[in-house]
Amino acid sequence: MAPTPVEAGLLVVILGSALATAVLRDVLGSIIAFSAYSLGVAMLWVVLRAPDVGLTEAAVGAGVMTILLLLTIAKTVRPSEDRVLASFDPKTLVLVAAFVLALGATVPALPAVGSPDAPVVSSEVSQYYLDHAYKDTGVENVVTAVLAAYRGFDTLGEAVVVFTAGVAVVAVLKREVTA
Amino acid sequence: MSDARRSPYVESTIIMTTVRVIAPFVMTYGLFVMFHGAKSPGGGFQGGAIVGALVLMLAFAFGADPTREWVNQRVVVGLLVVGVATFVGIGLATMALRGSFLEYAVIAGAKSSKYAIELIELGIGAIVSGVITSLFFLIDAGFDVEADAADAGGETPEETPGEPSSGEVGS
């Protein structure tokens, strides 16, 4: 299936900013390129009808992550150099290329976007959620129904992971700051 | 080295005015995304990230130190605890009503499970926004290269466990 002009444009932006993130020598430039990459991915999620994921990507990836990274480089020493591009070890390049090829080889095995034969569409489980979610939980958004009701225990685990990680970082950094 | 000590904050009337105008809308949108996750795209994780980003935006406009004084750190850590307690509390409440853990339908009342889910989304939002806010303030306060070097005599600060020295403050 050929991508629509919007998808094609977004893919160009995403690939370009991802490459820029990797090859730019200046850390500040890398962070800005990474932020653009996140914004592109967020828009692609919305185009692919996954607005829940797009919202998260835009808020966390493009917004919060960028500010935290910028703060970090503001607090550390930034080497100033004239070179624009970073230099790469050829061995690293070969390894990365092999990794990309290995991952890319799996792409043809995926069903086409929106294909009626995709396992997600034809599966009994998805159909069960679509049929019963509103009756069982009273919420219209099936994603929320699955997250908070059917998989509520998983989500509790996720929330506790975020909580624990946050408290651990706060405890460690507080010690460092007040030491 | 001197570059590292300089505060990254630059006061700008344009940024301050813009942030002052859009901040209430961002807060409302964050709460909307949390509350409305049951009906439209969104939920606690997304709404919490938006509310957390609002605090970052305020710090961006007015400087991190005034914002830190404005946002009480104890309240932020309290938010994390309240969020987890809400989630676990609802789970235990359904068990107390002879249901399974997080079986919302046993709570009496029309659309009870919908309200329980929305309450849980609010709890998740509290956790996420609290983590983002406290991470931001801690990264901003810490890692002062020269102050750390001066405190610990050029070494990374290392102390005997369980006895944090309270005299010198790095920030």
Image (cartoon, coloured by chain):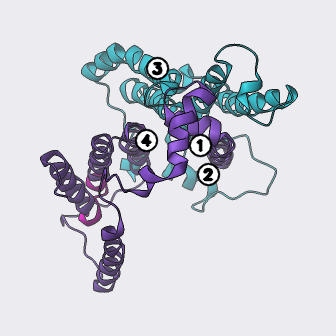
Q: Chain of mark 4?
A: A
In front: label 1 or label 3: 3
Q: Chain of mark 1?
A: B
Disc 1 to disc 2: CB gap under 8 Å: yes
Q: Which mark is residue B151?
A: 2
Instruction: Name the side, left or right, on which B145 lies relative to B79.
Output: left
The quarter of the rendered structure image containing the C terminus of chain B is top right
Residue A65 sits in quarter = top left
Q: Which residues are magenta?
A: A21-30
Q: Which mark is residue B32?
A: 3
Cα distance between the residues tagged 4 and 3: 17 Å
Cα distance between the residues tagged 1 and 2: 8 Å
Residue A160 in view: yes
Question: What's the residue at 67%, 13% (across, down)?
Answer: B110
- Direction left: furthest residue: A5
Amino acid type, label 4: Val
State the image coordinates of residue A172 (x, y, percent, origin top left).
66, 49
Q: Which chain is purple?
A: A
Local SS, label 2: helix
Question: What's the residue at 42%, 24% (across, down)?
Answer: B58
Q: Chain of mark 2?
A: B
Amino acid type, label 3: Phe
Amino acid type, label 1: Gly
Cα distance between the residues tagged 1 and 3: 39 Å
Question: What's the residue at 57%, 34% (across, down)?
Answer: A132
Q: Which mark is residue A150?
A: none
Identify the residue position indicated by label 4 in the image: A60
Earlier-in-chain disc, 1 versus 3: 3
Cα distance between the residues tagged 1 and 4: 28 Å
